[in-house]
Image (cartoon, rainbow, N blue to C red):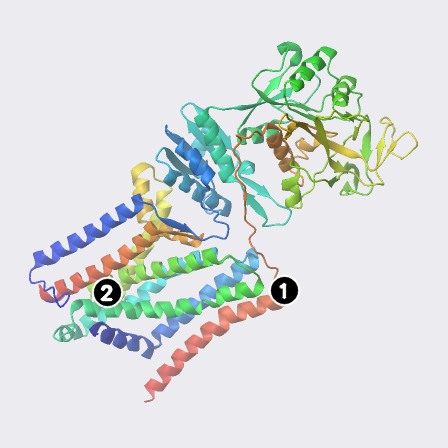
């Protein structure tokens, strides 16, 4: 019998042989194609494709790296993480990706202390990095507006693991600051996800700022530093060290201000009251006007605000050193004031208070010998904005992370622009829904069925 | 071309009976329902969820479209007559397959009203819509090829339909099984899973290995159908 005009299969054995050869060839083609991956990412901003920077990082890998992703199967964000990780796996022979649904394998989730979906563990030998959902996704103000920065976070973590480079951030202790193990544990986790190694530092015990410090952060001191500690910090800053200072209003910080005044600013001992720009009418939580600077660029781009609950103002002094550039970051409304009577039962604007508009923070840049500027310090009047209750308000977390990234940054820092993925949305009015439903569910299908019935009827009556 | 003669005859038989119209009509109504409900509830101008549901519907639609393709020829005894003509087995099988595929494509073309609706509401990302349709057509082609093969293995249309449904469903759910497995078994399950292969298309990624997978199923089952017809009528 003829299969084609040119092929005539006379025997059963010929038939079976032909079938076996055909199936084998097709299987081999599949194996070959899956080994040499060719793919096209047709999404608007190529969200499933790796950037050239990531490919450079992957080319540096020479030891196996295991990536374990705990994601919820079927979720859109989980799928995005999974697709991206597959790209890493396909792009490097050294990367092995394991996707796990923590609900189906709770024992594994417990082993890695997984608390939320979209958590990624990246392991190389005994060292590992943990990336959380917030390290991978940044949410905008409008529902559906979300940036996926997974590639930045994963590539950076891989780079840190293969170069064994750790950007260490020291949190100052010993002056009543909140602990990074408790009050600011969330902040610590996010920083770790960003590839930093947060550690505690008690200057009165250490006697100096450790050499590996990429940044020191002072969060909400209850007490001022001692003159000896001030000298250590001054020495560190003069040697090119970087500082992030977040004030806790209600105390005079003479020693800290002695440092700041050298650079042209000071932290005021007041409490900012802003009746015009309070967060949900809370006059003690100003949502100040954000000014343009490298640290605020991302939140301005996304039209996000930063909420500063319980903040003092920061002001400029008369003199600024020639090698320092000062940039104001946040300004309150003209109807705001700095309340100086912090023991009053009720806040009211009076003569002793500082009239608005007030600055809530400054970024300081140092002019280098090549006449360029580099990050030096950020001083803010508020520490509560990164507290447990306020961290996820508006753009607080993103601003904090951007500030730290800016302060720690150097020319060698890897940065991959997040991929914005605004899914077009539509709000349908009842009339639109009616038209949509009638057209797609009733009219078109019914027209097809009626056409069939008509043809059948006509043929029947022929 | 002899293939076209078989194709035309088969297509005529589809559209002279209410079968094709009923299948396309019901399929459009269900797809339209998924499209409307997903759009109204998510408010997002994307078709990922719609394609996923339409893909699952193919598991049910493909057996209906294909179960009579070769069983009818065998049970009515017309196959022997056909094989005495200058038409080769390949012509018969491919002609019939293309006819079933055309019916499926006609139904698919009518769903193009969905992206048109999206365009009237805003600016959807067309990449995932294009790849979604590509994946959907390939998935449909694969299920129809399986159905064609099953219709060549039995004289009974119901059995052919049930077998097609069973194999289609197995290819669909093997991806769920993969989540419970580890190591090589998981890789193999993922490799043969139609869902895993189809998923990439839904998100806007066109992967050559996924395209090859579906084309392999189509080619393999079309040729296996040829062999099955020869075996039944020759040996």
- The chain to which mark 1 is attached is A
Q: Nearer the viewer, mark 2 or mark 1?
A: 1
Q: Which residue is mark 1?
A: A429
- Point out the residue furthest to the left here: A11
Quadrant hosting residue B231: bottom left
How far apart marks 2 and 1 lie (CA) works out to 48 Å
Q: Position of residue A157 (x, y in %)?
A: 48, 31
Residue density around tag 1, few if under 14, some if 14–19, many if 20 or more, within 10 Å: few
Q: Is residue A102 visible?
A: no
- In this picture, residue B107 sits left or right of residue A319: left
Quarter of the rendering occupied by the C terminus of chain A: bottom left
Residue at image position (78%, 34%) is A359
Residue at image position (55%, 68%) is A436
Disc 1 is placed on an element classified as loop
Q: Which residue is mark 2?
A: B151
Residue at image position (43%, 40%) is A85
């Amino acid at each position: 019998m003829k299969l084609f005009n040119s092929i005539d299969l006379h025997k059963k054995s010929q038939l079976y042989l032909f079938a076996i050869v055909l199936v084998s060839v097709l299987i081999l083609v599949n194996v070959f194609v899956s080994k040499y991956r060719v793919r096209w990412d047709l999404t608007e901003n190529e969200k499933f494709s790796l950037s050239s920077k990531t490919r450079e990082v992957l080319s540096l890998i020479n030891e196996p790296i295991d990536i374990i992703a705990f994601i919820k199967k079927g979720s859109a964000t989980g799928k995005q993480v999974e697709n991206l990780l597959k790209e890493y796996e396909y792009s490097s022979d050294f990367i092995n990706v394991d996707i796990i649904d923590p609900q189906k394998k709770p024992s594994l989730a417990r082993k890695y202390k997984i608390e939320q979906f979209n958590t990624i563990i990246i392991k190389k030998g005994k060292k590992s990095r943990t990336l959380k959902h917030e390290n991978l996704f940044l949410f905008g103000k409008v529902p559906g507006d979300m940036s996926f920065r997974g590639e930045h976070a994963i590539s950076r973590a891989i780079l840190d693991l293969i170069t064994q480079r750790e950007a260490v951030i020291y949190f100052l202790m010993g002056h009543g600051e909140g602990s990074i193990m408790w009050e600011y544990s969330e902040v610590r986790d996010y920083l770790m996800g960003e590839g930093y190694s947060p550690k505690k530092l008690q200057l009165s015990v250490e006697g100096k700022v450790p050499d590996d410090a990429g940044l020191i952060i002072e969060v909400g001191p209850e007490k001022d530093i001692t003159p000896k500690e001030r000298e250590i910090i001054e020495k560190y800053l003069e040697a090119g060290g970087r500082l992030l200072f977040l004030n806790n209003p209600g105390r005079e910080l003479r020693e800290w201000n002695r440092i700041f005044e050298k650079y042209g600013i000071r932290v005021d001992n007041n409490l900012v009251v802003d009746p015009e720009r309070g967060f949900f009418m809370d006059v003690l939580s100003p949502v100040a006007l954000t000014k343009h600077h490298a640290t605020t660029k991302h939140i301005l781009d996304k039209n996000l605000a930063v909420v500063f609950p319980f903040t003092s103002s920061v002001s400029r002094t008369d003199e600024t050193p020639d090698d320092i550039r000062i940039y104001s970051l946040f300004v309150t409304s003209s109807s705001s004031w700095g309340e100086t009577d912090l023991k009053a039962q009720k806040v009211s604007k009076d003569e002793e208070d500082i009239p608005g508009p007030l600055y809530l923070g400054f970024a300081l840049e140092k002019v280098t010998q090549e006449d360029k500027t580099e990050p030096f310090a950020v001083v803010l009047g508020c520490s509560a904005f990164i507290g447990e209750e306020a961290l996820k308000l508006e753009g607080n977390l993103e601003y904090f992370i951007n500030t730290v990234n800016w302060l720690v940054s150097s020319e060698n820092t890897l940065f991959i622009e997040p991929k914005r993925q605004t899914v077009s949305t539509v709000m349908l009015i009842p009339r639109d829904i009616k038209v949509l439903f009638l057209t797609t569910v009733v009219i078109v299908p019914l027209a097809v069925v009626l056409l069939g019935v008509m043809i059948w009827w006509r043929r029947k009556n022929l | 071309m002899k293939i076209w003669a078989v194709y035309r005859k088969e297509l005529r038989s589809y559209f002279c009976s209410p079968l094709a119209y009923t299948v396309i009509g019901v399929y459009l109504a269900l797809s339209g329902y998924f499209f409307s409900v997903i759009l109204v509830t998510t408010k997002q101008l994307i078709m990922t969820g719609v394609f996923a549901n339409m893909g699952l519907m193919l598991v049910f639609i493909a057996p209906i479209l294909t179960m009579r393709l070769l069983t009818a020829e065998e049970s009515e005894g017309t196959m022997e007559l056909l094989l005495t003509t200058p038409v080769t087995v390949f012509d018969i099988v491919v002609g019939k397959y293309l006819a079933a595929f055309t019916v499926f494509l006609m139904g698919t073309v009518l769903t193009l009203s969905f992206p048109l609706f999206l365009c009237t509401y805003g600016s959807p990302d067309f990449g995932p819509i294009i790849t979604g349709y590509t994946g959907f057509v390939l998935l449909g082609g694969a299920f129809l090829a399986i159905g064609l093969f099953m219709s060549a293995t039995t004289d009974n249309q119901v059995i052919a339909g049930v077998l097609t449904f069973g194999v289609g469903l197995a290819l669909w759910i093997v991806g769920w099984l993969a989540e419970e497995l580890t190591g090589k078994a998981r890789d193999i399950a993922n490799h043969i899973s139609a869902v895993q292969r189809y998923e990439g298309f839904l998100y806007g990624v066109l992967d050559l290995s996924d395209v090859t997978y579906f084309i392999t199923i189509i080619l393999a089952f079309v040729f296996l159908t040829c062999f099955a017809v020869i075996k039944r009528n020759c040996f």
